[in-house]
Image: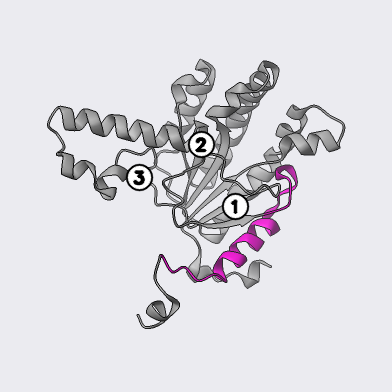
Amino acid sequence: MKEAIDLNSLPEHIAIIMDGNGRWAKRKGAMRIFGHKNAIKAVREAIESSAELGVKFLTLYAFSTENWGRPTEEIDALMQLLVSTIRKEIKSLTKNNIKLQVIGEMNTLPAICQQELEEAMQITAQNTRMTLVIALSYSGRWDILNAVKNIALEVARGALSAQEAGEAEIFNRYLSTHNIPDPELLIRTSGEMRVSNFLLWQIAYSEIYVSPVLWPDFRREHLYEAIIAYQKRERRFGKTSEQLNNV
């Protein structure tokens, strides 16, 4: 399947909503955290296969602001898993020349998580092969509202004019993804047909691919399937096919 991918028309940025850990665990007769633990292999395969192909940015939706409403024991276990996973994977990221970046309200995470993430980002800051973006305590609405708030402050102190504040290019600079291109391909696992408050501004023209596979079972061949489906689509950005073909 990998041979069917056109390496000259890869999406520069792939974003993934990693969904289905809880249902996977339930089918096994286990607690939800069992699904989260078994999802680590899927994360590794997504990272490694994306880097091998030449994808430049991979964003993984790991924990939303809404997820704070889950049972305390699940959140605590998730945070412990996050810390242990970062510690284990930092050598692999460095070896594979992959930079780590985090988007979201990091200040809401436990102090030990913040510390491990900051250290990992510092260690990998100069890596250039691919940027791995982890969305933690993130929501698209928070991202947009935070940008609006900061733009309003800039206008109030005279650093921006009201006219400039209404420009999309200016608005992009205040998003958490200001240094990341918008994703061309958004993958969601588990068959659910929604974007779950993820990168709401940034996915305006993303191609969406929904996989029926639950995230712990997601492997590189499933990523290849998504990329092949993406490459078969015509990206028109509001134009007609005739206009594109005449360019």
What residue sits 17% from the left and 44% below the top? 163
Measured along the vertical axis of the image, is residue 93 above or below residue 118? Answer: below
Amino acid at circle 2: Ala
Q: Give left or right: position of 22 versus 125.
A: right
Element type where label 2 sits in the image: strand
Callout 1 crowding tier (Cα within 10 Å): few <14, some 14–19, many ≥20:
many
- Furthest residue to the left? 158
What residue sits 57% from the left and 71% below the top? 232
Q: Which residue does the numbered mark 1 point to in the structure image?
A: 187
Q: Which residue does the numbered mark 3 point to in the structure image?
A: 179
Task: Give yes or no for residue 236 being in the magenta stretch.
Answer: yes
CA gap between label 3 and label 2 equals: 14 Å
Residue 155, image x and y in percent?
A: 18, 32
Measured along the vertical axis of the image, is residue 33 above or below residue 191? Answer: above
Task: Give yes or no for residue 212 being in the magenta stretch.
Answer: yes
Q: Which residue does the numbered mark 2 point to in the structure image?
A: 135
Amino acid at circle 3: Asn
- The quarter of the image holding the N terminus is bottom right
Residue 124, image x and y in percent?
A: 45, 38
Residue 217, image x and y in percent?
A: 75, 47
Region in magenta: 211-237
Q: Earlier in the sequence, mark 3 or mark 1?
A: 3
Q: Give left or right: position of 222 versus 26.
A: left
Element type where label 1 sits in the image: strand
What residue sits 58% from the left and 47% below the top? 16
Q: Earlier in the sequence, mark 2 or mark 1?
A: 2
Element type where label 3 sits in the image: loop
